[in-house]
Image (cartoon, grey):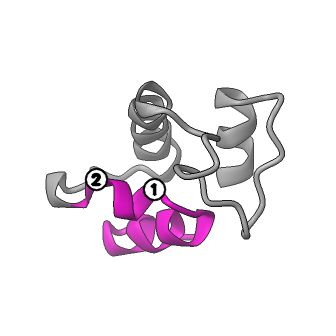
Amino acid sequence: MLDAIFKKIRPDSNIDFSSNLIEDYLLDSFDIIILIEEISAAYNIIIDQNDINMANFMTKQTILDMIQRNGGQI
């Protein structure tokens, strides 16, 4: 599901588990806002405001960890 969200936001990017989404400029701040909305809808969760920080959006794994912390099923 997360891969489909990435394709929707950045269809031209190849994002894998080794990608650093912030440092490699694969996501910008606007993309992260959209990503939060898409994740919330797709996983039927509300992301805690304390989880909205760059550290939680660095890699696919940090995003998946955040989803699970907020009650999402992976």
When asked about the image quadrant of residue 55, the answer is bottom left
Q: Which residues are magenta?
A: 51-74
According to the picture, the residue beneath numbered tag 1 turns out to be 57
At a point 41% along the width and 32% down the height, the residue shown is: 29
Label 2 to label 1, Cα distance in Å? 12 Å
Of tags 2 and 1, the one toward the viewer is 1
Work out which quarter of the rendered image holds the C terminus and state it. bottom right
Q: Residue at x 55, y 52 (%)?
A: 23
Residue 64 position, x and y percent, is 52, 68
Q: Quickly name the residue at label 2.
A: 47
Magenta: main secondary structure: helix
| Nearer to us in this view, 44 or 32 | 32
Q: Tell me residue 53's x, y (percent).
A: 28, 54
**Which amino acid lies under the numbered mark 2 shown in the image of this protein?**
Ile
- Asked whether residue 40 appears in the rendered view, the answer is yes
Residue 1 in view here: no
For the residue carrying disc 1, how many other residues have a C-alpha within 10 Å: few (<14), some (14-19), or many (20+)? many
Whether tag 2 and tag 1 are in contact, CB under 8 A, the answer is no
Where, by quadrant of the figure, is residue 72 drawn?
bottom left
Q: Tell me the element at label 2.
A: loop
Would you say residue 65 sits in the magenta stretch? yes
Q: Disc 1 marks which amino acid?
A: Phe
